[in-house]
Image (tube, rainbow, N blue to C red):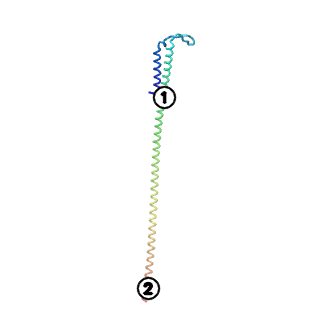
């Protein structure tokens, strides 16, 4: 129990005890001036009735405040749920958008990778053809040089044989 509630209960019990102890004094009639007329009535009972009326008015006011707060809380809860739903939808939309972007980017990367791979393979094929051509040309040059050397050697042997024979 809250301290305010406990304090309020203690005050009401104290007033009830005070009223019970002094009940005869509360019922004693006195002369009361109402402004326009004078009346004979028990002052204590009137004051006790006024206290009860003020307490009833405060209770009604407290009930009104609690009802208002409850309705506001309910409205805020509904708004919060709708905002949470909107946020979840926006987040799902962002995830979908991100997934689409990542898929497009991955496709672009794969296409770029395939293109670069094809370019590298084409370049390697071209270099291989160039290398074969260079090797063939070197082989032909070497064969021509060897053939020329053999011809010189054969001519040199024929000339030497002719000079020996002669």
Q: Which mark is residue 69?
A: 1
Q: Could you tell me how far apart the alpha carbons at marks 2 and 1 are, in whole angstroms?
A: 131 Å
Q: Residue at x 46, y 15 (%)?
A: 21
Q: Which residue is mark 2?
A: 160
Q: Give the image location of residue 133, x and y in percent.
A: 45, 68
First in sequence: mark 2 vs mark 1: 1
Q: Give the image location of residue 64, x and y in percent.
A: 49, 25
Q: Nearer the viewer, residue 63 or 155?
A: 63
Q: Residue at x 47, y 35 (%)?
A: 80
Which residue, as the protein is rendered here, is positioned at the far front?
Answer: 21
Q: Residue at x 48, y 28 (%)?
A: 69
Q: Nearer the viewer, residue 91 or 36?
A: 36
Q: Give the image location of residue 35, x and y in percent.
A: 57, 13
- Numbered circles on residues, count: 2
Mark 1 lies on a secondary structure that is helix
Q: Give the image location of residue 58, x and y in percent.
A: 50, 22
Q: Badge 1: few (under 14), some or many (20 or more) residues near its Cα, within 10 Å?
A: few
Q: Badge 2: few (under 14), some or many (20 or more) residues near its Cα, within 10 Å?
A: few
16 over 160 or under it: above or below:
above
């Amino acid at each position: 129990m809250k301290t305010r509630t406990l304090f309020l209960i203690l005050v009401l019990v104290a007033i009830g005890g005070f009223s019970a102890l002094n009940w005869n004094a509360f019922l004693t009639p006195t002369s009361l001036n109402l402004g326009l007329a004078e009346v004979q009535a028990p002052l204590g009972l009137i004051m006790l009735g006024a206290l009860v009326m003020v307490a009833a008015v405060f209770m009604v006011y407290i009930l009104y405040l609690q009802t208002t707060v409850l309705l506001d809380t309910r409205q805020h809860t509904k708004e919060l749920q709708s905002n949470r739903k909107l946020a979840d939808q926006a987040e799902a939309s962002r995830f979908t958008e991100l997934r689409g972007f990542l898929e497009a980017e991955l496709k672009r990367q794969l296409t770029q990778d395939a293109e670069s791979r094809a370019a590298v393979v084409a370049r390697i094929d071209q270099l291989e053809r160039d290398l074969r051509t260079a090797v063939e040309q070197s082989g032909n040059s070497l064969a021509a040089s060897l053939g020329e050397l053999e011809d010189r050697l054969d001519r040199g042997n024929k000339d030497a044989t002719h000079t020996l024979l002669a």
